[in-house]
Each structure stands twice: as structure tokens, then as C-alpha cells.
Amino acid sequence: MTIMQDTIVTRFPPSPTGYLHIGGARTGLFNWLLSRQKGGKFILRIEDTDEQRSTEKATKAILDSMEWLGLDWDEGPYFQSQRYDIYNNFIERLIASGQAYHCHCSPEELEKKRIAARAKNLKPKYDGTCRDLGLGPVPGSVVRLKTPQNGITQFDDKVKGMITFDNQELDDLILRRSNGSPTYHLAVVADDISLGINYIIRGDDHVNNTPRQILIYRALGETIPRYAHVPMILGPDKTRLSKRHGAMSVLAYRDMGYLPDALLNSLARLGWSYGDQEKFSRKELIEKFSLKNVGKSAGVFDGDKLLDVNAWHIRQSSNEFLSRELIPFLNKLNLKDLNPKRLEKAVATLKARSKTLVEMAEGASFFFQENITFDKEADSKFLTPNSLTLLQGLYKKLEKQTNFNQETLEKSFTEFLSENQIKMKELAQPLRVALTGKTVSPGIFEVMEVLGKDIILERINKATDHISKKR
């Protein structure tokens, strides 16, 4: 078995029969990381030969997911549905070299053979009736690979180690169906050869496909790539990951307010490790990724860990970046025409306390609402006749103030509290409710600095009017 030694070329070949889910995204990530780390090439291929199930909507969702994750590709996307001439050329090469043959056995005959084999407790594989007959093509015939009938097919998996298959267990694989379309194994090998793929990283559910594909490489006399089969992803209950565990599409995580780097960080840690480190920047993932550190056991998806990782990435992000990312979420709350400076200041007050962009947008909404709504419980508890006088007195003091940074505000409040012989807690919550409508927000001086004098005075005034009308 010969192995390629040149520049690393990896690929990611999703099927557009559905959205890109996190299992597929992790496979794409591992291929992308290896190619980026080694200065290689990462190719995107869309395996859309299933005409009935493949859709343009799913293709767009896959491309949107890859772009959002930042898994940029160097070539492609190539579409298998547009490459049938290439596949047929490879099939004709195999036929011409005697490594493949036309099979005329009908589906009914094949079913009889399978039933007979089962009755004898034999594996129901093709019995080679047409293997050496030298038949030509006829309507309804297929093309099969002449699989070796003895010996072994072996490969050194970069994750699992040496894996061996007995050739007697393998079938004379169909390469071209009776309708003229290529089969999955032939198309994959033809693509990987023609695109120069020399590293194939994929889920370990593909292990059993590998010997069949290696035999096609051998029959063509082509160089065999390196294989690495990564472990599957399980839910917290150690069963196969499903929607109930959070196995949603990549775009669903985007819409729930996760950052792309946070999702990549969490995906990388599903089956791969680097000491005890849990949180990685994108740059660190590229620098530290290695197939040697991909484990053989399944990775366990943990939604709580993802949330924690996302909160960390939010804290590490610049206010400018978060402001851009937050805009669509604020727009969904019907908050538009946002003041860029106020947005960036608002983000600064919320990034340390937000786990998702959805949470941040909800927390930031009062900064941009023209008319805030008072939470009923907060209104009842804090916007009372007792707080009316305090808020009116504070309004008069703030009205005279020109500088509204945190330092000068704190100084003014110290004076106001002293003049009225009260403690901050007596003023803070009524004021917080007056300014935000809620009892929970960033620090009151942070909030005031972001809102600015005009809005502060307007909201205090509205709150005092509201209290007066309740009397």
C-alpha cells in the first residue's frame, strides 16, 4: 500500500438531504484544522447524487453554516451531480483493465440468490455469476468491481490503529447502477483521486466503507490516502446524539445566540483533547490540533458546557465584534436604527453577565426602547409614593449636572444620599426600575453613563408621573 507524502489535502463532503448538524460540523472542523495547521488545502464537496432527497434549501443551509462557522474552503464547492462524466471515465478504466465487469443478473435473480444463501447460513453476497463471462452492457445491467476473493484488506487508521478486513467477507461491489448512475463508493473514490485528497477524516460509522474504497484505489492503481475515523458523539446519557440532546442544526445554534468560535471550541473537544485545557481560541485550535490526541472513545455532548464556553468566548470578544453580532438579535426585538456608540457601550456593560447573544439582546433592550415597560412586580414594590420624592429630588440634582461619566455620577449620588440622609439601597432600586423597567441590570452608574442625561431625565420624569397617577 503506497501513501501520499505531499501537501496535505483534506475534504468535507456533506450531503444536502438535510441541514448541517453538529456531528457533521465536527468532521468538517477536524479536516479544516489539519489543513490549516499544515498549510494544506481544504476542499468542500456536496454529495448530492440522491436526487429525490437533495434540496437547494439544504445546500444553502450547509454553505451558510460553513460560512458562519468560518470554515473557509480553498476549492469548491464541487457538486457530485455535475461530475458524472468523471465517474464514468473511472468506471471505463476499471472495465478496460479487467478490474470490473458487466453483470446481467436481474433483481429477481439476485433476491433468489440471497434467499438461498441465508438458507445455508451464508452471507448473502453476490455469487459472481457474471464475473468471468466477459459480458457487455445491456439495458438493466450493472457494473461490478472484481473484489479479491481471498487475502485481507488492511489500513493503519490514524485514530484507531491497524484495522483488517477479510476479503472473503466483501462483495463484488456495484460501481454503476442499472439506471446508469454511479454508486456512493465509486463516486467518492473518483472524487478523492481527481481532487488530490490524501487525508480522509470522517466519522467511525464509515470504517466499514473503507476496505471497499481501498479496493477501488488498488484496482485503479492509485495512491491510497491516509484515513482517520473519529469517534461518534453521544448525549449526556451515553446514547447516540439526537435532537432531544441538542443535536440541532448549526444554524439553530447561531439563532440561539452562540458565537461560531464557541461552537467550534466545543465541537473540537468532542473526542479531542489537549491536556486539561477546555477553552480555546480559533488560533489555539489550529496551533494545537493533532490526530494523535483524538481519542478512540465517543465524545459526550454537554449543553451546559457549551453554554459555559460560549459565555467565555463572549467575555473574550471585543465590544466592536459583539456589537455587530448583536444587531440581528436586537432587530428581532423590533429595535432598529441603533446608535453605534450607545450599542458598543451597552455591550461593554453586559458582556460579563451574558451567556448568549439572545440573553445579551434581552438585557440590552431597555437601552434602545423609546418607551420602557415597568415589570409589574417591580412597579408595585419600588415605584411607590415613598420613592416619588427621592426620584423628584434626584431629577433636580441631575438636571444641573453636565458630566455624566461614572465617576462624577458616583460623586453626585454620594452628595444626594448625604443631603437626604438615606442609603443607596433606598434609591438604587426605584431608580433602576425607572430607568430600565426591571430590578436586574448592569451597575446603575454604568446604565446611566450609557443612556446619557437626556434619556435619564426623561425616564425619571415618566416614572414620577406614573407614580403620581397611581395615587
Image (cartoon, rainbow, N blue to C red):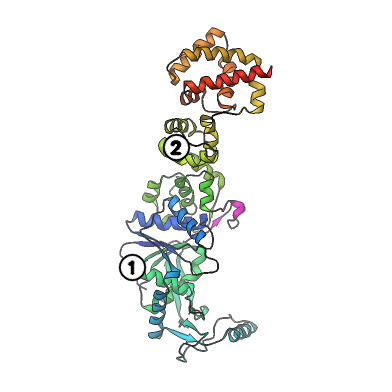
Judge the density around disc 2: few (<14), some (14-19), many (≥20) Cα neighbours within 10 Å: many
Left or right: 397 in relation to 238: left
Q: Secondary structure at mark 1?
A: loop
- Could you tell me residue 254's position as x and y percent? 50, 47
Residue under the point 66% across and 26% down: 377
- Total residue callouts: 2
Residue type (three-letter) at the residue carrying disc 2: Ser
Residue under the point 51% across and 54% down: 22
Q: Main secondary structure of the magenta part?
A: loop
Mark 2 sits on what residue? 323
Is 246 included in the stretch rendered in magenta? Answer: yes
- Location of residue 407 (image quadrant): top left
> In the rendered image, which quarter contains the C terminus?
top right
- Location of residue 124 (image quadrant): bottom right
Is 378 included in the stretch rendered in magenta? Answer: no
Judge the density around disc 1: few (<14), some (14-19), many (≥20) Cα neighbours within 10 Å: some
Nearest the camera: 42 or 274?
A: 42
Report the residue that reaches farthest toward the left: 6
Left or right: 336 in relation to 374: left
Residue type (three-letter) at the residue carrying disc 1: Met
Q: Is residue 281 above or below residue 121?
A: above
Mark 1 sits on what residue? 4
Quick check: can you spot residue 443? Answer: yes
Residue under the point 50% across and 10% down: 415
Magenta part of the protein: which range? 230-248
Marks 1 and 2: which is nearer the front? 2
- Could you tell me residue 170's position as x and y percent? 51, 78
Task: State the CA–CA distance, disc 1 to disc 2.
Answer: 46 Å
